[in-house]
Amino acid sequence: MTISQDIEPRTYFRTLEAALADFRPPAENVEMILDTVRGLRYEHVYIPESRAFIALEPAGGGSPLAFIASGYVAVHPEDGDNFWVELPAHQASAKGFAAVAEKVEEAVIPTCATCFTNLPSTGACDYCD
């Protein structure tokens, strides 16, 4: 038995286009996404709290008919074979964008040993010296 606390919170959208605008896949993937799910009979469109994918649910609930992720679309039609389509542009690895982004080193600003304010480039404290 599933209780409401077991379900990951979701954000529902009126249209797939609205969900795509929020999910923001690469522009070159949008047309292929729309072509892949065209013809599916879904009623609900949502993005889970994890923001890992967009799901298309059939009328009356049940298992999603399609999952749209950053690198693929997995389709599970009610009356056919499951298939998936790899998208041409991948946003990031499965570990997330942070894993592939370059880290920016922050500059360490020296502080005054007496009043603990940031020192100017001269190295002399404007308040203490």
Image (cartoon, rainbow, N blue to C red):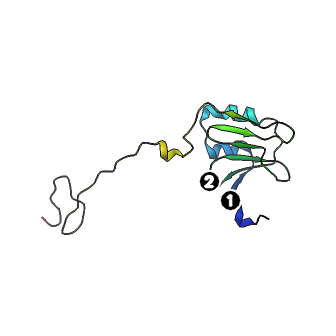
* Kind of residue indicated by mark 1: Glu
Q: Residue sitting at 86 percent across and 53 percent down?
A: 60
Marks 1 & 2, CB-CB < 8 Å contact: yes
Q: Which residue is mark 2?
A: 50
Left or right, 30 with respect to 38, comes to left
Residue type pointed to by label 2: Ser
Could you say which quadrant of the image residue 23 lies in?
top right
Q: Residue at image x 14%, y 59%?
A: 124
The x, y position of residue 25, in whole percent, is 61, 39
- Left or right: 28 as drawn, with respect to 125: right
Mark 1 and mark 2: Cα distance apart in space: 8 Å
Residue 119 position within the rendered picture, expressed as x and y whole percent measured from the top left:
21, 58
Which mark, residue 8?
1
Packing grade of label 2 (10 A; few <14, some 14-19, many >=20) is: few
**Under tag 2, what secondary structure?**
loop
Q: Residue at x 65, y 42 (%)?
A: 69
Q: 10 Å neighbourhood of mark 1: few (<14), some, or many (≥20)?
A: few
The answer to which of 32 and 78 lies nearer the viewer is 78
The answer to which quarter of the image holds residue 129 is bottom left
> Which mark, residue 84?
none
Quarter holding the N terminus is: bottom right
Of helix, strand and loop, which one carries label 1? Answer: loop
